[in-house]
Image: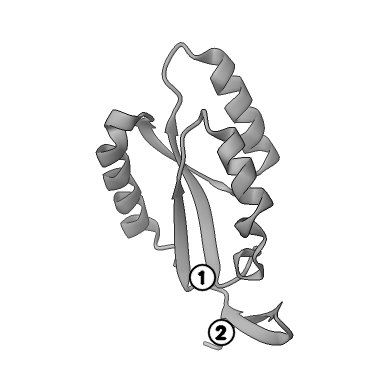
Amino acid sequence: MEEQRHAFSEKGREVYASEVPLLFLAINSGPQYGGRRADIRASWLHHPLLAPGGPVAFRFVVGAVKAGNTSMAEVFEAEVSQFRGQFLRLPIEDGYHQLTNKTFALFRWFAEQRPA
């Protein structure tokens, strides 16, 4: 089976990638950090290697919004709708004290899905 390759222009030269990303970049985040995600989108997330179909795939890794926080949930859901495909939502409550469990959930997801 022949791999399909995509060309990316970087500093005047062509960079090629296969259909399957070579690298998966998991960006840990929380539902409440929309401003930080916006800063990332406005800066280094514009790199050509991170373009859809490129050699580097990325996702903002976010757990569930704490129960009862409907205003944060609404804001977060609006962002998810606006930036479809940028989020990996794990079935674990998000929070500082859940970082270890969130990391294990991410590894479990990666082992099952192997996006890169």
Q: Secondary structure at mark 2?
A: loop
**Crowd tier of the residue under label 1, counting other residues whose Cα lies within 10 Å: few below 14, some 14–19, many 20 or above:** some
- Image quarter for residue 6? bottom right
**Crowd tier of the residue under label 2, counting other residues whose Cα lies within 10 Å: few below 14, some 14–19, many 20 or above:** few
Which mark, residue 64?
Answer: none
State the residue position of label 1.
21
Which mark, residue 3?
Answer: 2
Q: Looking at the picture, does residue 27 appear above or below residue 32?
A: below
Q: Secondary structure at mark 1?
A: loop
Q: Amino acid at mark 1?
A: Pro
Nearer to us in this view, 74 or 14: 14
- Image quarter for residue 7? bottom right
Q: Position of residue 68 (x, y in %)?
A: 46, 11
Number of numbered markers:
2
Q: Looking at the picture, does residue 113 appear above or below residue 88?
A: below
Q: Residue at x 60, y 49 (%)?
A: 40
Q: Amino acid at mark 2?
A: Glu
Q: Residue at x 31, y 58 (%)?
A: 111
Quick one: quadrant of the C terminus?
bottom left
Q: Position of residue 22 (x, y in %)?
A: 47, 73
